Image (cartoon, rainbow, N blue to C red):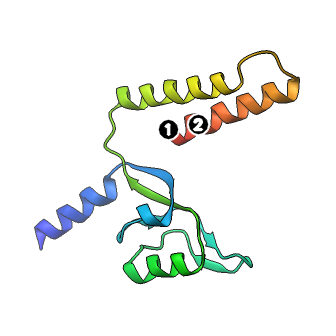
Amino acid sequence: MYHFVAELWQTAAMKTRTVFLPPGKLLPGMVVARPANGAQGSALLATGSVLDQKTLDSLHRHGIEFLTVDIPDSRDPQTISREIKEAEARVDYIFRGQGTLARARLHDTLIDYRREQAE
């Protein structure tokens, strides 16, 4: 019993990362991070739902292209920093050259989004 409680505590205390994955990369046991809706807006999965094989099969039938899930994150701070720099470099490359104020705002919004996703 003690081993089970300790294991449960470690899982609860584990750092997670929110990612967007296509159904083919989802696995049973993953936890839904944001609600999933069908094509007509009907609720398919609530935040906190734990995926099982039946649910994964249902996602395929409903044509869900991506799902937001929380996964364990074992990255160290150096890896996170490197990934943020790489993401910023990709966005900077896409937005290289002169542009409008709206383009600059879009660049900044994308940089913020990519930082958030990498952290």
- Seen in the image, is 81 located left or right of residue 36? left
Characterize the local packing of mark 2: few (<14), some (14-19) or many (20 or more) Cα atoms within 10 angstroms.
some
- Residue nearest the viewer, comparing 7 with 91: 91
Q: Mark 2 falls on what kind of element? A: helix
Task: Give how far across and how far down residue 8 sits, in percent.
Answer: 25, 65
Disc 1, disc 2: CB below 8 Å? yes
Point 35% across, 70% down: residue: 29
Report how many numbered discs are placed on residues in the image: 2
Task: Give how far across and how far down residue 55 sits, in percent.
Answer: 46, 80
- Seen in the image, is 95 located left or right of residue 69? right
Task: Give how far across and how far down residue 1 sits, in percent.
Answer: 12, 74
Q: Mark 1 falls on what kind of element? A: helix
Q: Residue 106, located in which quarter of the rendered image?
A: top right
| Residue under label 1 | 118
> Cα distance, mark 1 to mark 2?
6 Å
Residue type at numbered disc 2 = Arg
Q: Residue 3, located in which quarter of the rendered image?
A: bottom left
The answer to whether residue 111 is above or below residue 40 is: above
- Seen in the image, is 11 located left or right of residue 46? left
| Residue under label 2 | 114
Task: Give how far across and how far down residue 39 sits, in percent.
Answer: 70, 75
Q: Residue furthest top?
A: 98
The answer to whether residue 23 is above or below residue 93 is: below
Point 19% across, 67% down: residue: 5
Characterize the local packing of mark 1: few (<14), some (14-19) or many (20 or more) Cα atoms within 10 angstroms.
some
Point 44% across, 65% down: residue: 24
Point 54% across, 30% down: residue: 87
Residue type at numbered disc 1 = Ala
- Seen in the image, is 49 located left or right of residue 89? left
- Residue nearest the viewer, comparing 40 with 97: 97
